[in-house]
Image (cartoon, rainbow, N blue to C red):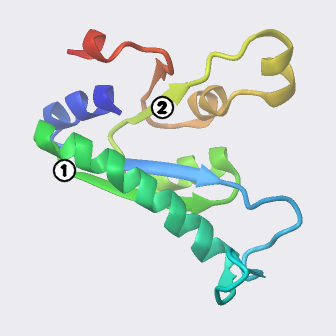
Amino acid sequence: MRMAAQIAPSLDAELVLLHVTHLPAGLVEGSEIRPMPDREPVEIGSFVRGATLAELERYAEELRPLGVAVSARVELGDPVRRILSMADELDCAMIVMGTHGRTGLAHLLIGSVAEKVMRQSRRPVLTVPGSFPDDAAA
């Protein structure tokens, strides 16, 4: 995120923090869950979006002092399709993604969202290793 925050001002761009997730197995959007026994049921999509958005907003607050406009979004669905469709919808200048660096069997079985986005995107994609040191981006 820090790398993207450093690039955004040079593109006169807003940084959009996007997290795409699947719902837990067996649950569909519209289903209700009871997060605590003494609480009212909530719609699962709203619950997942709300919890994840709160986390993204904490990251956004850390980046705003760097002088970049930052917003946060949470989407449900297939990560590759949602990332690409959001990039089109927001007319993004660039997609910046962190990578987990899986190799071998793990990469073969799990695949790489970043790799699929790079192959399918019509926009520039910059990938940054998850272990990229914070001070190296400065």
Q: What residue is at 61 percent from the left and 23 percent from the top?
A: 100
Q: What residue is at 65 percent from the left and 90 percent from the top?
A: 40
Q: What residue is at 61 percent from the left and 65 percent from the top?
A: 48
- The location of residue 63, given as percent across then percent down, is 23, 41
- The location of residue 112, given as percent across then percent down, is 69, 28
Q: Is residue 59 visible?
A: yes
The quarter of the image holding the N terminus is top left
Which three-letter amino acid code belongs to the residue tagged 1?
A: Ala
| Farthest residue, direction bottom | 40
Q: Quadrant of residue 39?
A: bottom right
In the rendered view, tell whether residue 81 sits above or below residue 89: above
According to the image, label 1 marks what residue? 69
In the rendered view, tell whether residue 54 sits above or below residue 33: above
In terms of sequence position, does the residue under pointer 1 or pointer 2 come before the other?
1
Q: What residue is at 26 percent from the left and 13 percent from the top?
A: 135
Which three-letter amino acid code belongs to the residue tagged 2?
A: Met
